[in-house]
Amino acid sequence: MRQRVRNSTVLSSLDSISEQQRFQLLVNSITDYAIYMLDPNGHVTTWNPGAERFKGYTADEIIGQNYSIFFTPEDRAAELPGRALRIAAAEGRFEAEGWRVRKDGTRFWVNAVLDPIVNTEGELVGYAKITRDITERKKVQDELENTRAALIQSQKLQALGELTGGIAHDFNNLMTVIAGSADFLLRKPDLPAAKRKQYLEAITETADRATTLTNHLLAFGRRQAIRPEVLDLNVRLDAVADVLSRTLGDSIAIELELDPGASRVEVDAAQLETAILNAAVNARDAMPEGGKLTLSTRSLHENGSDFVALGISDTGVGMPRDVAARAFEPFFTTKAVGKGTGLGLSQIHGFAAQAGGRAEIQSDEGRGTTITMILPRTEKEQAALTEGPAMSELPKGLCVLLVEDNPQVRDFAEGLLIDLGCKVIPSESAEDALERIGSNGIDLVLSDVVMPGMSGVEFARHVREEHPQVPVLLATGYSDEVLKNGSEFAVLSKPFGAADLSKAMAAVLDEHAREFRRRPSAAGRV
């Protein structure tokens, strides 16, 4: 009976107070949130116990103060308090998370909401501010993020260890062949011609394999300079299928499932064919008793963009789920030592990513594997196919300024240029080359890109500005500057031979043919 009388008394009291008093009673009963009011200029006009509990100010201390007192010095310097008021007034709400400062100077992480208050005439009369202390939640999130970062770092270190070991293993094998062959040639100058040819061919073939290995590494890391061209993927796969049928043997049947609507892509043709070959070789190894390899294309539309999905499917032994999950990692391989570098599938991953797409793998034990490269589709027209000669003819007596900081590479390039009938002025730096170019009748500049001091690109720009009649050909094995920003100059990839060099020089000279013909003939200079 007493309890019922007491409740009736409370209800009677609540009925007798105004709506504003009810609201104030509600606000004052909340201690987990800071709920207070600001005037139009951001000064505190009300203060609840929740605000006092985790901000540390009593109502007498804080009412009349500008609410910017709660912000960090950095946020005040960035004028965040005033900007928050303006955004709330203009957009009807401002919400953010960030650090705030208690009375004792300690910081806490909050979720803050700021709402404008307008009167019946629509005039701004102040703001309602609700702040929640979420420091503990942020602490948990930060610990989770730190744990995730530590795991990623651990995985990176593991991958780096595998990468380093793989590189050391494969390059040491390659260097053994090169060094051994060179040693025989140096120690036994009277070797029969046939034997000398055998060792020289071994050096050449091994150098080509080293180049391929390097290109695979660059492709995996998306650091390879690409030469995109528009290709009809269906036509290219039809041609590739003929090559694969001879390469993989009679025990493997090759089928094509081509979507007529999935055709043109803009990719590096050499990398594309390498990726297809890598997938096909893996498929062959997975079908030791023979089987079927299917090359397919299909149209794909994702996130408002059109793609072409290129699939390479086999009927081989397949992979366990944990192996398939690591298949694109560099140097990860289940093959025996000496049977593969572990870079084949990682090259596919790198090629697809560098082309603006992605690579996927689906495999089931006993049911085969499908590797899919999803490549952006293009509406550009395919360029006419042209095939140049093995060597290009160069003007007789061409004077070439060769800029290369590596003495061995400089000597090699100088020998090639002389063999092509050129007069060569070697220089070991861009700064030295700039001093020589004005007084030596230079017809063409061949410069490395990555050099100490002034880079090859910077040097080429100086040449273009100060000697616009002199064409420039840049050479590089890898350059972040060229890769990220492209190049306004012709670029020759290292390593290169006489045919590559002569064709690149001829192309550069053709572009400058009009200016070149205005100059005195280079013929007769020796």
Image (cartoon, rainbow, N blue to C red):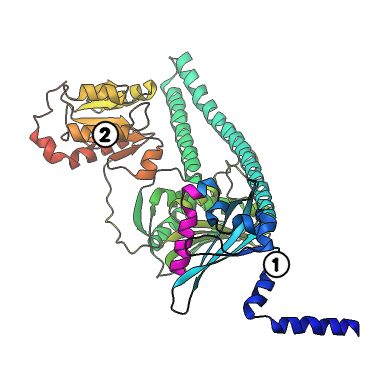
Tell me which corner region of the image, top left, top right, bottom left or bottom right, holds residue 513: top left
Task: Assign the C terminus to one quadrant of the image.
Answer: top left
Please state the horizontal and vertical placement of residue 514, each as a whole percent of the image. 12, 40
Q: Which mark is residue 30?
A: 1
Badge 2 marks a residue whose secondary structure is helix
**Magenta stretch: residue 126 in it?**
no
- Whether residue 137 is visible: no
Please state the horizontal and vertical placement of residue 509, each as a whole percent of the image. 19, 38
Per the rendered image, the range of residues in magenta is 76-92
Q: Residue at x 34, y 23 (%)?
A: 410
Depicted 429 relative to depicted 514: above or below: above
Q: How many marks?
A: 2
Q: Residue at x 18, y 32 (%)?
A: 466
Please state the horizontal and vertical placement of residue 220, each as a whole percent of the image. 51, 45
Task: Assign the N terminus to one quadrant of the image.
Answer: bottom right
Tell me which corner region of the image, top left, top right, bottom left or bottom right, holds residue 433: top left
| Crowdedness near tag 1: few (<14), some (14–19) or many (≥20) residues, C-alpha within 10 Å | some
Q: Residue at x 40, y 48 (%)?
A: 270
* First along the sequence among labels 1 and 2: 1
Farthest right residue in view? 1
Badge 1 marks a residue whose secondary structure is loop
Depicted 319 relative to depicted 165: above or below: below
Q: Which mark is residue 460?
A: 2
- Whether residue 488 is visible: yes
**Residue type, mark 1 in image:** Ile
